[in-house]
Image: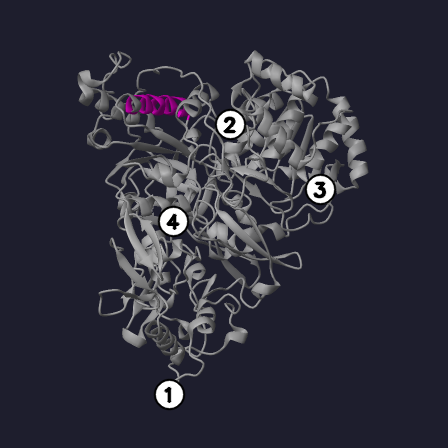
């Protein structure tokens, strides 16, 4: 440790600390413009100059390393004069339009001038003017170049953190101007992080522009609903109307950064598609009724189907308290374990449970990224978990974390990775098995135990140079983190992939690598949904339904017996519907008709259920088929908690009232229970949280008041390991046809984001991504309208040629309802074989004298 004295205060700091960091620890205010905590120092603004004893010139404190015995002064007359002069130079060309500037009231330049600036300027020349009007760089970002103070925060944030390199500078000196390529940001992520870090009103949010002043806003700290990273948001409302989102450096996992969905995608709460009041089906149509009428009707219908099976499906975007109460309702009131929380894939609990119990690291992402090496398996982290990608990029570039990528789809993070292995979809299990075999072979007699004695290298193809390079990289490092995309659960090979992940983590542990594992969920509370027991084979706390002791504990606290047999997942529930055995199917906050593979099958199944109840905020396709529709509160209209990918539980706070006749989800669950002449106790959100903290081991000891701004971490609860798992699966043979896969795109991830007007202004049109090699062979060009056809159906969308894409792969985002992508897919088949051809325009006449071009 080094001893440093600043303004006659002495403290000890670690080697490598800067003078600015030391001053901040002492609570000494040193002004800055160009400095950002998460970026390397630039020292261009010269606002943070300080005097150092024994050094002739003033030094930038942000870029000066502390040394033992250093004596620093931050408030001498020379420093004050220098700061005042620097601010005077900035104001010389800065337009004095504070009354109309969106940054007014939270502008760092205003604050600095008030604290340190001259009372009168020394400059009398005409102000420099770049443009007389603001420039609309994109649908969401507008720029006033004249206000720019050339701090370079936006450019560096875009390049070094986001990795988009969409902003740059032209000219030099006082003529420097920040801009996008050819004055546009059409190809950027539209994340708005440049707006967040701009200290003045040079870069502004167009959707927020001229809508409110900071002092008019009521701000609520909450958590993003769009993916499992769990970013902290501060939502601003004015008179109950949503205005904007910003984020804070010192709170949450995201350190001020957000993706486009988090910053601009919350206006879905005001969607025109909201369900206004309860509806029941009469004469084939949904008819609005009162809550009392809906209750009377639903009571009769529930009694009529009581002798048949029941099932429940709940969204992993709902708060923990709602999910916990929903599974309690299904298990105690409907007397069934037919419960699921995913409308896109099934979670094989027999392999998932041991993996979560043995290796899941419920610790800060910053810590697990701090390991020597991070292996990302599956998915496309750029589009599924953008802010996690920012953190990984920071780890690779600043902390020298070794990134290893194994996936079917390329991502922008590949550019920072040491090893990138492309595998065919479904081939992840075989490739992981090859990595395990490579580690075992390299370890030889050094590997303890005999559990791996019979492991052989997989069949030819899986043991290629790619997996070998991964094995070599893993062997050389001291500590390893494995981040796993839940996109892998789409594949029929999901169980085998989880088994090989378990094998890999066991080997790494035996080799002393201290492995940590976390999932990369693309739904905000998927971890919470699993923890709350919204699974057919698992109770709250991820304890097996067949566990007599776990069932007895819950039954004693709930005052009701719990069925002992594992229930049906969504696929099996749909089979029960088709077979005429499903009485009441209760769906909350999710849309399987759009999300589940094989739309025709889902349509038949939902139509065959005796009673389909849909509880949702929005009129989804599934709600359109329901017999009873119950209008629920949307995100931001009820409080609760989410558990993110790290296992961090955070407060989700209410920032507006439910609209129309919508009720809170907990109130509706109570309403349904009462129709069966039962009551769920406790029933309020704080009381349910307390019960969760009492009955679920990972949450024990937590209090809602104790969550704080950063939330709190749930505990890892070890379970018995499944032991060493089966031999590697066969290597997928190369298909001679194009294979279709799906997943999230950057601007959308599920039906919430597609109800955001702002996101729809920046999102790409529905598209089909393919490799340059495949498109050249088919005679296709970027931007062509193409038809994608499978044995089940077809769709038409715009072609996007991706030069990083592997040959033989076709990607279509799952997030565009109009495409009905799941009409092309078949249950149990993934990826799906397709043909792609150009959509030829034809001339058609729809009335005399008018000709239009169609496909």
Q: Which element is circle 1 on? A: loop
Q: Which element is circle 2 on? A: helix
Disc 3 crowd rating (10 Å Cα; few below 14, some 14-19, many 20+) is: many
Residue 162 x/y as whole percent: 36, 52
Q: Which element is circle 3 on? A: loop
Write down the residue under mark 3.
Answer: 663
Q: Is residue 453 visible?
A: yes
520 left or right of 575 in image: left
Range of residues picked out in magenta: 492-508
Which secondary structure class fits the magenta region best?
helix
Write down the residue under mark 4.
Answer: 799
Residue 338 x/y as whole percent: 60, 22
Q: Nearer the viewer, residue 329 or 804?
A: 329
Q: Is residue 855 visible?
A: no
Residue in the image at 79% along x and 32% along y: 297
> Quick one: label 1 or label 2, which is nearer the N terminus?
1
Q: Is residue 220 magenta?
A: no
Which numbered mark, 3 or 4, is in the foreground of this view?
3
> Quick one: label 1 or label 3, which is nearer the N terminus?
1
């Amino acid at each position: 440790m080094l001893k440093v004295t600043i303004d006659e205060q002495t403290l000890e700091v670690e080697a490598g600390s800067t003078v600015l960091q030391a001053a901040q620890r002492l609570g000494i205010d040193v002004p800055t413009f160009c400095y950002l905590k998460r970026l390397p120092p630039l020292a261009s603004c010269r606002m943070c100059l300080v005097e150092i004893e024994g050094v002739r010139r003033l030094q930038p404190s942000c870029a000066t390393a502390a040394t033992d015995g250093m004596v620093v002064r931050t408030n001498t007359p020379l420093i004050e004069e220098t700061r005042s002069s620097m601010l005077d130079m900035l104001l010389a060309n800065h337009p004095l339009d504070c009354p109309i500037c969106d940054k007014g009231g939270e502008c760092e330049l205003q604050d600095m001038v008030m604290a340190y600036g001259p009372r009168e300027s020394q400059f009398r020349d005409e102000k420099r003017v770049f443009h007389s009007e603001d420039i609309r760089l994109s649908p969401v970002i507008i720029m006033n170049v004249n206000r720019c103070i050339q701090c370079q925060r936006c450019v560096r944030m875009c390049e070094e953190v986001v990795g988009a390199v969409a902003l740059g500078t032209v000219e030099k000196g006082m003529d420097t101007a920040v801009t996008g390529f050819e004055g546009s940001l059409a190809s950027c992520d539209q994340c708005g992080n440049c707006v967040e870090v701009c200290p003045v009103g040079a870069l502004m949010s167009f959707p927020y522009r001229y809508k409110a002043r900071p002092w008019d806003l009521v701000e609520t700290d909450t958590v993003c609903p769009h993916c499992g990273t769990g970013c902290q948001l501060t939502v601003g409302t004015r008179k109950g109307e949503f205005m904007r989102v910003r984020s804070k450096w010192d709170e949450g996992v995201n350190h001020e950064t957000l993706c486009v969905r988090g910053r601009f995608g919350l206006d879905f709460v005001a969607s025109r598609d909201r369900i206004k009041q309860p509806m029941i089906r009469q004469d084939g149509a949904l008819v609005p009724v009162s809550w009392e009428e809906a209750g009377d009707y639903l009571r009769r219908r529930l009694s009529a189907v009581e002798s048949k099976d029941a099932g429940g499906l709940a969204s992993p975007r709902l708060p923990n308290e709602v999910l916990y109460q929903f599974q309690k309702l299904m298990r105690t009131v409907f007397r069934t374990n037919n419960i699921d929380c995913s409308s896109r894939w099934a979670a094989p609990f027999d392999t998932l449970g041991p993996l979560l119990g043995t290796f899941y690291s419920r610790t800060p992402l910053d810590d697990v990224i701090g390991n020597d090496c991070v292996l990302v398996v599956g998915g496309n982290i750029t589009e599924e978990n953008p802010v996690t990608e920012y953190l990984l990029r920071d780890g690779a570039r600043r902390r020298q974390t070794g990134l290893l990528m194994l996936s079917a789809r390329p991502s922008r993070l590949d550019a920072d990775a040491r090893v990138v292995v492309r595998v065919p979809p479904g081939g992840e299990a075989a490739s992981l098995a090859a990595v395990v075999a490579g580690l075992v072979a390299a370890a030889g007699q050094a590997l303890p135990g005999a559990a791996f004695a019979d492991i052989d290298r997989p069949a030819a193809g899986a043991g290629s140079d790619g997996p070998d390079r991964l094995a070599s990289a893993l062997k050389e490092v001291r500590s390893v983190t494995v981040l796993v995309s839940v996109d892998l659960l789409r594949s029929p090979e999901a169980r085998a992939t989880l088994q090989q992940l378990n094998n890999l983590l066991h080997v790494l542990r035996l080799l002393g690598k201290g492995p940590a594992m976390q999932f990369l969920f693309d739904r905000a509370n998927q971890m919470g949904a699993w923890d709350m027991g919204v699974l057919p084979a698992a109770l709250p706390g991820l304890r097996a339904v067949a566990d007599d002791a776990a069932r007895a504990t819950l039954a004693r606290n709930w005052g009701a017996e719990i069925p002992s047999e594992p229930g049906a997942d969504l696929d099996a529930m749909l089979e029960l519907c088709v077979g005429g055995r499903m009485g009441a199917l209760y769906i909350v906050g999710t849309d399987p008709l759009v999300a589940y593979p094989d739309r025709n099958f889902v349509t038949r199944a939902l139509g065959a259920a005796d009673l389909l109840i849909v509880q949702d905020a929005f009129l989804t396709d599934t709600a359109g088929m329901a017999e009873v529709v119950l209008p629920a509160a949307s995100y931001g209209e009820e409080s609760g908690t989410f558990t993110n990918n790290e296992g961090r539980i955070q407060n989700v706070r209410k920032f507006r009232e439910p609209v129309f006749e919508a009720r809170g989800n907990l109130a509706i669950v109570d309403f349904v229970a009462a129709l069966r002449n039962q009551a769920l106790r406790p029933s309020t959100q704080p009381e349910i949280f307390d019960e969760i903290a009492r009955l679920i081991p990972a949450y024990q000891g937590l209090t809602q008041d104790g969550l704080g701004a950063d939330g709190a971490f749930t505990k890892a609860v070890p379970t018995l390991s499944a032991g060493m798992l089966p031999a590697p699966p066969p290597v997928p043979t190369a298909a001679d046809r194009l294979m279709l896969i799906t997943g999230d795109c950057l601007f959308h991830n599920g039906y919430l984001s597609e109800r955001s007007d702002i996101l729809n202004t920046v999102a790409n049109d529905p598209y089909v991504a393919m490799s340059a090699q495949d498109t050249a062979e088919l005679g296709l060009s970027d931007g062509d309208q193409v038809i994608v056809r499978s044995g089940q159906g077809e769709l038409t969308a715009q072609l996007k040629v991706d030069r990083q894409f592997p040959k033989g792969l076709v990607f279509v985002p799952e997030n565009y309802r109009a495409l009905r992508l799941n009409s092309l897919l078949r249950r149990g088949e993934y990826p799906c074989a397709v043909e792609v051809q150009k959509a030829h325009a034809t001339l058609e006449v729809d009335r005399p004298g008018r000709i239009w071009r169609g496909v």
